[in-house]
Amino acid sequence: QKEVEQDPGPLSVPEGAIVSLNCTYSNSAFQYFMWYRQYSRKGPELLMYTYSSGNKEDGRFTAQVDKSSKYISLFIRDSQPSDSATYLCAMREGGSEKLVFGKGTKLTVNP
Amino acid sequence: SQTIHQWPATLVQPVGSPLSLECTVEGTSNPNLYWYRQAAGRGLQLLFYSVGIGQISSEVPQNLSASRPQDRQFILSSKKLLLSDSGFYLCAWSLGIITEAFFGQGTRLTVV
């Protein structure tokens, strides 16, 4: 079992839809969780950063962490064509310098 | 504010040639520095990370090496490139072990 599993998609939704992106993981030592957005041929851009379980909201984006289920989610409300990108989840153990990434989910928002 | 510079953006090199990719960070001190490679369908693979000058940890045995000659400079090198070294190389930095990581814009390397 891979440490971090992420459905690669592709995921296609109409403009204005609510998008749900998810990752599961097997390492219970992960404590720090991140979501990155990556446009084609660009470096990943940090969207959300959370520690331990709970929710965090930033504008149209909400990140959820459920450590008991080893499951994290990113919700995008009122999705826009500019949200079309690949979304990567990333995680880090407490005390570790290393980030472990999911493979990314490619999202297309159609106008 | 902090910025990260990575160059070149694209590179085409023949098999057997050397490689040097450079990454620098501005606006912070003593960052953790990382080199990742991204291949289609394989996600981001951590190649090297460094917590200080001259301190390099290798994650994947391969044809590449890394060096950190200055606090905010991280270099990825190869003496002889292989076809399998083609990919998208990303440099990243973070402050310590509890913070998020920030990425450069990447170098797309094609070995021909």
Image (spheres, coloured by chain):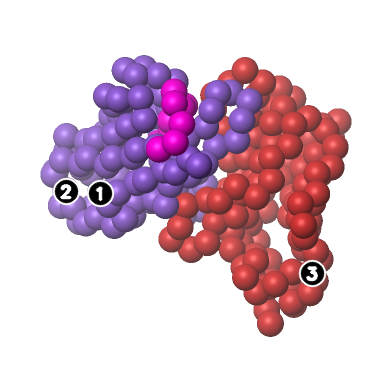
Chain colours: A red, B purple
Residue A40 visible from this viewpoint: yes
Disc 1 crowd rating (10 Å Cα; few below 14, some 14-19, many 20+) is few
Left or right placement of residue A86 versus residue B18 in this view = right
C-alpha span from label 2 to label 1? 6 Å
C-alpha span from label 2 to label 3? 47 Å
Q: Residue B56, labelled with which disc?
A: none
Q: Report which residue position mark 3 lands on.
A: A78
**Residue at (80, 49) in percent of width and height:** A57
Q: Residue B83, labelled with which disc?
A: 1
Q: Are marks 1 and 3 on the same chain?
A: no
Q: Amino acid at mark 3?
A: Asp
Residue A5 visible from this viewpoint: no
Residue B72 or A47: which is nearer the viewer?
Answer: B72
Q: Amino acid at mark 1?
A: Leu
Disc 3 crowd rating (10 Å Cα; few below 14, some 14-19, many 20+) is some
Q: Residue B15, labelled with which disc?
A: 2
Label 3's element? loop
Q: Nearer the viewer, mark 1 or mark 3?
A: 3
C-alpha span from label 1 to label 3? 43 Å
Residue A5 or A55: which is nearer the viewer?
Answer: A55
Q: Is residue B22 above or below residue A67?
A: below
Left or right placement of residue B48 versus residue B66 in this view = right
Magenta extent: B26-35
Q: Is residue B91 above or below residue B105?
A: above
- The percent position of residue B93, horizontal first and vertical second, equals 47, 35
Label 1's element? helix
Q: Earlier in the sequence, mark 2 or mark 1?
A: 2
Q: Chain of mark 3?
A: A
Q: Chain of mark 1?
A: B
Which of the 4 image quadrants contains residue A56? top right
Q: Is residue B86 above or below residue B20?
A: below
